[in-house]
Image: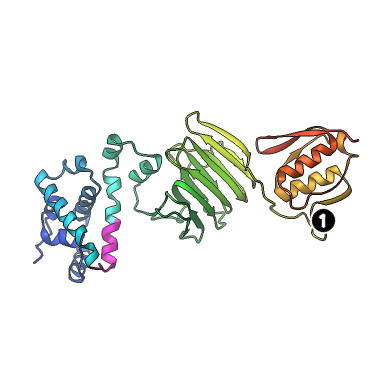
Amino acid sequence: MPHDYDQFLSADFLTDDFFVSHQLAPTPQSTAFWEAWSKEHSLEQWQQAVSLLEAIRLGLDGYVQTCLSEETIRQLLLRIQQTNAQLHKAEVPVTRFVRIKWVAAASVMLAIGIWWMTHSKATPYEHRLATLEKTFTEKINTTDQSQLIRLPDQSTVSLNPNSRLSYPSDFGQKNRLVYLSGEATFAVVKDTQKPFLVLANELVTKVVGTKFMIRAFSKEDQVRVQVLSGQVSVYRDQANPARVHQKGVLLLPNQQVVFTRETDRFDKSLISQPFVIKIPGRLKQATPFVYSETPIPQVLQDVKEAYGIDILYNKEALVDCQLTSSMDGLSFDQKLMIICKTVGATYDVIDGQVVINGGICR
């Protein structure tokens, strides 16, 4: 039978068979008891006991030994192992109080965050979760295919294999903040009042509504952000996600920034295969990018509008040049090569835009 738990401390809960049995294998009876008990009592010591039990699950013995005796830890570990061995025999019903238990268990990362960070080589992602002052939801993709995740604001995330995504319990109340380790593509619902922030390794990516990709694996030296539509700003994290006005890099469609963690350097460029964002209005009634004695400045304007990429050139030198060519179906680079070959020019990509060098009408 359950004890009178009014005066129990966390260590007392962890030596109580009824409490431990409920944490490891809840039943309808134990769940009903703890739900009723929680409505009339403080959960502080109860939650600490849940956190300590979760720490034992995680193998964080160094922290647990500051609160429990070695014999208590040994007995609890044995109970955990025995329960795990029997999990395949029964399906445990998930109720409201069971969810409360796991919400409390999530707080273990806060309770032991300082100790853990000083005794292990934690990644930036793990560091952030360990020091969160709120509970959070985490999604981990252990499959070999991307997984679609729908966030509370209806934004979607395509989470790639070996990647992790978390967001705090107050997501969407003041801003929309998520944490990423690995690679994911985001399609963000527009909300001008609530910025969408992605913290990935040392970078913060801020958007209002757009589609973009981030690659930020903890073991890789580079972090890459690519914009597929809209625009995003990317800046160095200063351990305070609320500081969204820092100087950073503004990215437009078909642009990317690569942040090298060792040198703390940003390199802005075009993505490897720029894609057409929209067909210019004047080309919609005909086969796109098919030209007959069309002024080169008009051709360059068409390419700029189609890909959303700025193209700089000497307008006076090329004002009378013309192009006759079919570039339909060609890549962005192939189009530029044909244009440059026509006028005897070359081009470079500098800071995410195209610079055409030289050129003269023939």
Question: In which quadrant will I find the N terminus?
Answer: bottom left
Asked whether residue 42 appears in the rendered view, the answer is no
- Left or right for 63, reference 263: left
Residue receiving disc 1: 282
Secondary structure, mark 1, is helix
How far across and how far down the image is residue 91, in percent?
A: 26, 68
Left or right: residue 163 versus residue 27 is right
Is 68 in the magenta? Answer: no
Q: Viewed as shown, does residue 238 lie left or right of 11?
A: right
Q: In the rendered image, which quarter is residue 349 located in?
A: top right
Q: Which residue is at 71% across, 45% downward?
A: 332
* Residue 103: quarter of image: bottom left
Q: Nearer the viewer, residue 31 or 272?
A: 272
Give the vertical position of 35 relative to 281 (above or below): below
Viewer can see residue 114: yes
Q: Position of residue 141 (x, y in %)?
A: 41, 54
Which image quadrant: the C terminus?
Answer: top right
| The residue stretch that appears in magenta | 90-103
Identify the residue at image location x=81%, y=37%: 341
Nearest to the observer: residue 83 or residue 234:
83
The residue lying at 35 percent from left, 51 percent from top is 134
